[in-house]
């Protein structure tokens, strides 16, 4: 009974099988509990006898099949150095285009050409923390269901609406047609992010770690901004750049000012 499930988990390490089956793998009790909370379909859980926690019992109460396997077998399936003793196979989430393009007070992060799984996962996590109404991930970014991306989201993959494998050019055009301003980040921009108003509905594009936003995408932006940095520093990590801009928007939207 477990052999077929173990084989599937191994296959889901590759994007080809994830695309074919519309399934992906999550590891650890926190991610499983977040998946349960979100209502996503969990196909089954594999756990070892060394695992102690509530995730399995909570899943079983939701009629999810949980299968105990040998600890060594489970550890071999894990993509981490310190396996947590439990993983699950889950249905891919649906794209939330209506929620993103139709939001009244849009606050959207666009990830364009992000190649590092840790960066993309951190950007999704940051977007959730900032209260973004959605995240759009370009079709040339790393797969959102890559195990390293999923882990780096810290469970927030299930908390923020997103569109995966998007045509960014078409997404930008649709955002603008819906009255949502689109801002590009560019080290050569004349305006600092702290000098623009971010209270109105907007989307911000963060480009690839190496080359930034593609020129044809940048040309579609209503305006571009930079993040002021000390002399001699060329750029920030993509995830850090996203955090700086998103939380500047949070500061403005909440009317936060420093007080002695």
Image: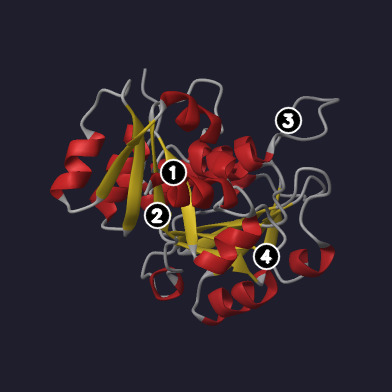
Q: Position of residue 159 (x, y in %)?
A: 36, 51
Where is mark 1, residue-wise? 26
Residue lying at the far bottom of the rendered structure: 177
Query: Rounded to the nearest whole Å, what is the CA distance between mark 2 and mark 1?
Result: 7 Å
Query: Rounded to the nearest whole Å, what is the CA distance between mark 3 and mark 1?
Result: 37 Å
Residue lying at the far left of the rendered structure: 61
Query: Looking at the image, which residue is at 57% across and 79% down?
Result: 174
Which label lies toward us, 4 or 1? 1
Which label lies toward us, 3 or 1? 1
Where is mark 3, residue-wise? 229
Q: Secondary structure at mark 4?
A: loop
Labels 4 and 2: the sequence-earlier one = 2
Q: Is residue 134 left or right of residue 259?
A: right
Query: Rounded to the nearest whole Å, what is the CA distance between mark 3 and mark 2?
Result: 42 Å
Labels 2 and 1: the sequence-earlier one = 1
Judging depth in this view, the residue of 235 and 115 nearest the camera is 115
Where is mark 2, residue-wise? 90
């Amino acid at each position: 009974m477990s052999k077929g499930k173990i084989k599937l988990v191994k296959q889901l390490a590759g994007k080809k099988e994830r695309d074919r089956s519309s399934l992906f793998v999550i590891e650890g009790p926190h991610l499983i509990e977040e998946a349960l909370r979100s209502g996503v379909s969990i196909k089954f859980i594999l756990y070892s006898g060394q695992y102690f926690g509530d995730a399995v019992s909570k899943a079983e109460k939701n009629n999810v099949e949980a299968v105990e396997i040998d600890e060594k077998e489970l550890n071999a399936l894990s993509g981490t150095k310190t396996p947590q003793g439990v993983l699950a196979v889950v249905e891919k989430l649906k794209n939330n285009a209506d929620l993103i393009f139709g939001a009244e007070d849009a606050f959207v992060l666009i990830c364009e050409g992000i190649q590092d799984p840790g960066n993309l996962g951190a950007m999704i996590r940051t977007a959730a923390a900032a209260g973004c109404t959605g995240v759009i991930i370009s079709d040339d970014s790393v797969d959102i269901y890559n195990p390293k991306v999923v882990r780096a989201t810290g469970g927030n993959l299930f908390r923020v609406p997103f569109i995966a494998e998007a045509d960014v050019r078409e997404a930008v055009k649709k955002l603008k047609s819906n009255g949502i301003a689109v801002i590009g980040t560019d080290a050569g921009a004349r305006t600092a992010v702290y000098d623009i108003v971010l209270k109105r509905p907007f989307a911000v594009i963060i480009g690839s770690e190496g080359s930034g936003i593609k020129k044809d995408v940048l040309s579609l932006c209503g305006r571009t901004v930079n993040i002021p940095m000390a002399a001699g520093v060329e750029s920030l990590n993509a995830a850090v750049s996203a955090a700086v801009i998103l939380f500047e928007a949070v500061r403005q939207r909440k009317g936060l000012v420093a007080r002695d």
